[in-house]
Amino acid sequence: MTLDQYRSVADRLLGPWVSAADRLGLSPDQVSVIAFLLAVAAAGAFAAGSSPLYAAGALLVLLNGWLDVVDGALARHQGVASDGGDFLDHVLDRYADVAIIAGFTAGVEAYALGFAAVTGVLLTSYLGTQIQAVGIGREYGGLLGRADRLALAGIVGVAAAVYAAPIVAGLNVVGLLLALFAVVGHLTAVQRFLGAWRDL
């Protein structure tokens, strides 16, 4: 179910964004920082828990995800791709993930569920980079990659703006998203581990 397999499609749509960032004199690192700040703003909107702000948060999350693709394309376009830029991007992505989940968690006050969700997400990402560290190559696959999570967060933000009442077991659509991140995040981490273990 991962959207990462469509990176080639996204790459073809990046041209105008990369050109605009280049004309503005932005560096890839600056784009990464802007993407992170959008995630923090989204977290604040989700934490407020009101319908209009959920919709705003959804838009900010989707922009965060898109700029997370733009920064790498801009680095290649400018010929400045580097390990340092890749490292900064990964660090800011993890902080962005934590911020978005924390915002959702605070908005519905489901802190135990939020803890399970954020650990699942972080372990998924950790396994991806750890697999790269042992020389197999960066792993984006699994049941739920970062692109999938951001897309779902955006969809849920819009859904919560429209309907915030409990749906199942006292959980509204945001609570269900956190539960999904918790369960599927850990399953994705295990899936990545087992795939890498076989390769090793």
Image (spheres, rainbow, N blue to C red):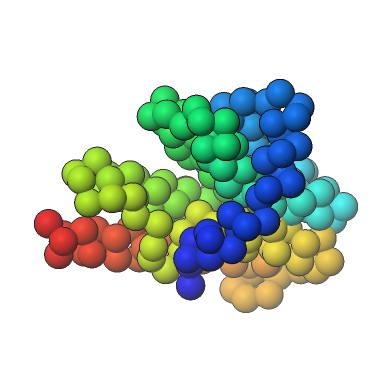
Q: Residue 198, how many percent across, how many down?
A: 15, 64
Residue 161 is situated, as x and y percent measured from the top left of the image, at 82, 60
Q: Residue at x 70, y 64 (%)?
A: 155
Residue at 62% x, 49% y is: 65
**In the picture provided, is 135 more to the left or to the right than 166?**
left
Residue 156 to residue 114: above or below: below
Q: Residue at x 50, y 54 (%)?
A: 146
Report whether residue 99 is seen: no
Position above or below: 25 against 100: above
Quick one: 30 or 171, which is closer to the camera?
30
**Front residue (pair 120, 72):** 72
User: Along the line of sight, which residue is nearer the eye, 29 or 35?
Assistant: 29
Q: Quadrant of the C terminus?
A: bottom left
Tell me where residue 10 appears, x and y as whole percent.
61, 58
Q: Position of residue 118 (x, y in %)?
A: 47, 48
Residue 145 horizontal side relative to residue 61, left or right:
left
Residue 66 in sight: yes
